[in-house]
Image (cartoon, helix red, strand yellow):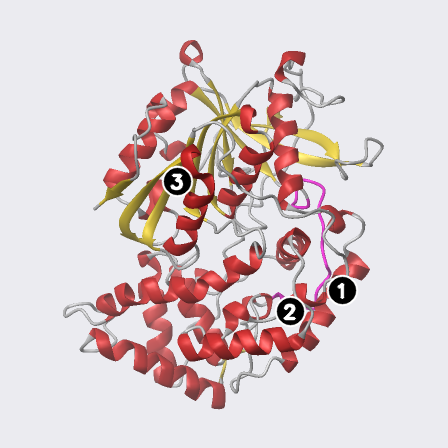
Amino acid sequence: MTQRTRILRNAALVGVTTALLAATAPVTASAATGGPPGTEPLSWTACEGATVDPRQQCATLQVPMDHSDPDSPRIDIAVSRIPAEDPDARRGALLLIAGGPGGSSLNDPSGKGQKLPQGVRDTHDLIGFAPRGLAPSTPVSCGLEYGDLATSKLRPWPAPDGSVDGNMATARRMADACTRNGGELIKHLSTANEARDIDRIRAALGERKISAWGVSYGTYVGAVYSQLFPHRTDRIVLDSVDNPDPDRVNRAWLAGHEQGVEDTFPHFAAWASRPGNPDRLARRAADVRPMLLRLAARLDREPIPWPGANPEELNGDVLRQALLDGLYRPSRYPALAELIRAARQGTVPPAPQAPPEDVLQNVAGVGAGTLCNDVAWPDSQAVYEKGVAESRATYPLTAGMPRNAMLCASWPYPPREAPVRITDHGPSNVLLVQNERDVATPLTGALKMRDALGRRAVMVTVDSTGHDAYLANGNACGDRVVSRFLATGNRPGSDVYCR
């Protein structure tokens, strides 16, 4: 898949491809692990998939759909592992928690897990899983109209004049589809329930404690797990960190994009104006922003047909969404620049290849259920109109989208419990790692997680650009600090800045 193909994909689409085979002999879990009654040990088998490391094993764990009801129907959670490479040095299990909501880490033991230093791979089983609702775990779907699967609809943009009338109507249509098609399971998708599923995974693995590496939304999952089950945690790394604001939760993450774009855009503008860059867009960095704003406004008035894309036109909102997606990491800059150059000339590149519709439907259903169940969203159009107007005035590059009404504005189910409040109560075993320039999880939100955890955490701030810091878009200094903590437990005595 080319970089161009990735621009318009929802960042939540992460590795939902591995299926499970028949069960083999079980591994016995000790009752001393503190597992809930009825937690069975896992039966491991080989995994399907051409990209899966042959050492990776797969299993299925049954958990309650409703953790508060012991008689609740059971749902499947797909789990994977690559065992520690040095059995004599084995310490325990390292759970890889994907972003999203709607991301899977099921293939991560074979993928990003293999980037971990040998000292971590020797001492830890690498564990992945597909969260509740996400295939090949028991799946959920809203059965949305195909046009509503576009990223610019899932992250809705206001009309060019700032109106949210159309967004409110779209929210009602999409929420109605989730009500009709989501079944009972969609009511039980939440971060707290994912954390409870993780504790079932820990117990089924036979582990008294578990370590974790959570990325993006996975940092909130990891923080909630550490809050609900503090004494079941060993070494916890939260990478590219979400704002844990208990009053807004997911609304704060969406709103964070406006600051994230502002933090990251100057880096892109400097790159896009650099002499000798074959993808250069302007002679000066200061010229890139007004050029993009003019281009988006022109596309609002005069969209360019884009056969095969969703939607089938390059309009101002699709360009703005492409900008946001293109700022996730510097390796995406050339494809973003190519799209901008084409649009300025009145043309488009080849349409991006979308994942299969059933995958899009599944990921959208998990995202909707989790985002809308975690916290109550306002249902008043006036609230969104006010927020959009303020955001458009201050952050023109994101044109009000981060404070707009998504389908949660019409969600029919009230939250089943209050959001988990992250506090400083618990062991001091958390390491945060955060890039200074991160479009999706900006530094401002990460600092709020740092404040909430207090003495429990130490934070590594990395002078780098991009989403996903550790072993991806950070720097060697930050990688060394995190690797040392995972391999040895040695954590800095205070916060660190990695230039």
The residue carrying pointer 1 sits among few (fewer than 14), some (14 to 19) or many (20 or more) residues within 10 Å by Cα, namely some
Disc nearer the start of the sequence (1/3): 1
Q: Which residue is mark 3?
A: 432
Front residue of 112/98: it is 98
Residue 351, how many percent across, how many down? 48, 70
Disc nearer the start of the sequence (1/2): 2
Q: Kindly indicate whether the residue at mark 3 contacts the one at mark 1 (C-beta within 8 angstroms).
A: no
Q: Secondary structure at mark 2?
A: helix
Q: Secondary structure at mark 3?
A: strand
Magenta region, residue range: 133-149
Give, as a three-letter code, the residue at label 1. Answer: Ala
For the point 54% across and 51% down, the residue is 100
Residue 214, how many percent across, how many down? 48, 39
Residue 301, how many percent across, how many down? 48, 90
- Note whether residue 396 is visible: no
Residue 195 vertical placement versus 99 (above, below): above
For the point 37% across and 62% down, the residue is 327
The residue carrying pointer 2 sits among few (fewer than 14), some (14 to 19) or many (20 or more) residues within 10 Å by Cα, namely many
- Note whether residue 142 is visible: yes
